[in-house]
Amino acid sequence: MLLLMDTTWDIEGIRSQYPALKDGTAFLDGAGGTQVPECVIEAICEAYRSGLSNLGGAFAASRRSMQLIDDARSAVADLTGGEAGGVVLGPNMTTLTYRMAGALAKTWAPGDEIVVSELDHDANVRPWVQAAASAGVKVRWARVDPQTTDLPTGQYAELVTPRTRLVAVAAASNLIGTVPDVVNISQIAHAAGALVYVDAVAAAPHLRIHMSSLGADLIALSAYKWCGPHAGAVVASTELLETLRPDKLEPSSNDVPDRFELGTHGLANMAGITAAVDHLAGLVAGEGSRRQRLDRSFAALTSREGVLVRGTISRLIGIPGVRMVGAPTRRTGTICFTVDSLPPGEVAARLGEQDIGVWSGHAYAWELTRALGLRDSGGAIRVSLSPYTAQSDLDRLVAAVSAMVMGPVDS
Ligand SMILES: Cc1ncc(COP(=O)(O)O)c(C=O)c1O
């Protein structure tokens, strides 16, 4: 395994592409947002340097701007296994999910039902709960096993009924890394004729996503979690998008996917999205289409993160008073823990003083932290890996937590 990591994952080569790493910070909050490589910064700068303009104009800058959007749609389609014509781009996942909830809720009737999950980030809960309230639709809740923090699939057989119109579920938890069995959850939903909305924001930075293999009818993601700019996307089939009528301005395009996109795009960010996907595809050397190279990069990334996460957990649990939150059957490169003697915010603050960046609190895993009894005690400490995470970042984390609990070790 170490040999595989050494030969395929050029960690120093990858790190050298990230200017923000030069200040020596151990950035261990990828789940909150990653740093960006030079190629993404350069693509964004070059878009501005070359000249941008409103879309649909009869001059070169306008054509360039339209090309940036088309390229970003293709890149996101490659990242998700979707089709470019079904990629809706926008400022972030939350905004787009509210937008989709508004559009889908127009197709619901009083007495219909939807299923949301306790595991999810609130951005894949509240938009649906609020849309359901407006449409007179019943909300059913999938519960997390508080011991394992798994989202048991079996409960969906009870939760999904012939009245279910939508199942919203995460492809991974943003707080504890749990990877639910979305494939089987989708099968149960589809058997009842329901649509499946998958929040892949916390999964896409760690796992290769294929929306059709997952069974996602719509899948949401945020580029700033996978080394890109602050922008979001929702991907669906063009056939599905054609059936939906979002609220929109009268003169704006009624085409798909444009009619889901409000106002003017962050055009330079579109260049950044494409550069970020190309960067991910190039994390390990090799030839092939971008989809093939993404397959290869993510196979290596997921395997590398698994090794790093297992090693970090086994060292953290050896520190007296450190408790891991959950032990999910499948997880991403995100882990979560508490320290008996110190509130999570205090642990994060002390780590921050040593330039170790982790998150603390509920991280918008609002229902999950309530279900686990963590919300009122300051949540938990989250450590989340990124392609540029070095073993030495994690060594610093473990040493700092250990020193916090046991006092510094004399060298
Ligand atoms: C799993 C998950 N879903 C949704 C969101 C919301 O994403 P955005 O900031 O793009 O609205 C986040 C943000 O942290 C997240 O981690």
Image (spheres, helix red, strand yellow):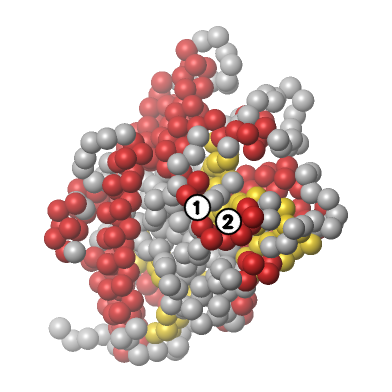
Quarter that holds the C terminus:
bottom left
Where residue 255 appears, as percent x and y from the top left, is: 65, 25
Q: Which residue is mark 1?
A: 214
Decide: few, some or many residues near mark 1? Use Cα within 10 Å; few <14, some 14-19, many ≥20: some
Q: Is residue 409 above or below residue 264?
A: below
**Residue at position x 58%, y 74% from top?**
144
For the point 45% across and 56% down, the residue is 203
The residue at the far front in this view is 191
The mark nearer the N terminus, 1 or 2, is 2
State whether residue 104 is above or below residue 142.
above
Residue 80's disc is: none
Q: Is mark 2 within 8 Å of ligand 1?
A: no
Locate residue 385: give its quadrant: bottom left
Q: Residues within 10 Å of mark 2 (few under 14, many from 20)?
A: many
Task: Say if mark 1 contacts mark 2, CB within 8 Å.
Answer: yes
Q: Position of residue 160 (x, y in %)?
A: 69, 63
Between residue 230 and residue 352, name the one nearer to us: 230
User: Is residue 26 toward the left or the right of residue 209 in the image?
Assistant: left
- Where residue 146 sits, quadrant-wise, is bottom right
In the rendered image, is residue 374 in sight? no
**On the image, numbered disc 2 is attached to which residue?**
186
106 relative position to 230: left or right? right
Q: Is residue 114 left or right of residue 152?
A: right
Instruction: Please tell me whether mark 1 sits on a helix, a strand or a loop.
Output: helix
Q: Confirm whether residue 143 shows in the render.
A: yes
User: Nearest the camera: 190 or 116?
Assistant: 190
User: Between residues 293 and 260, which one lies in front from this camera angle?
Assistant: 293
Q: Position of residue 157 (x, y in %)?
A: 64, 67
Which quarter of the rendered picture does the N terminus lie within? Answer: bottom left
> What is the C-alpha distance between the residues marked 1 and 2?
7 Å
| Amino acid type for the residue under numbered disc 1 | Leu
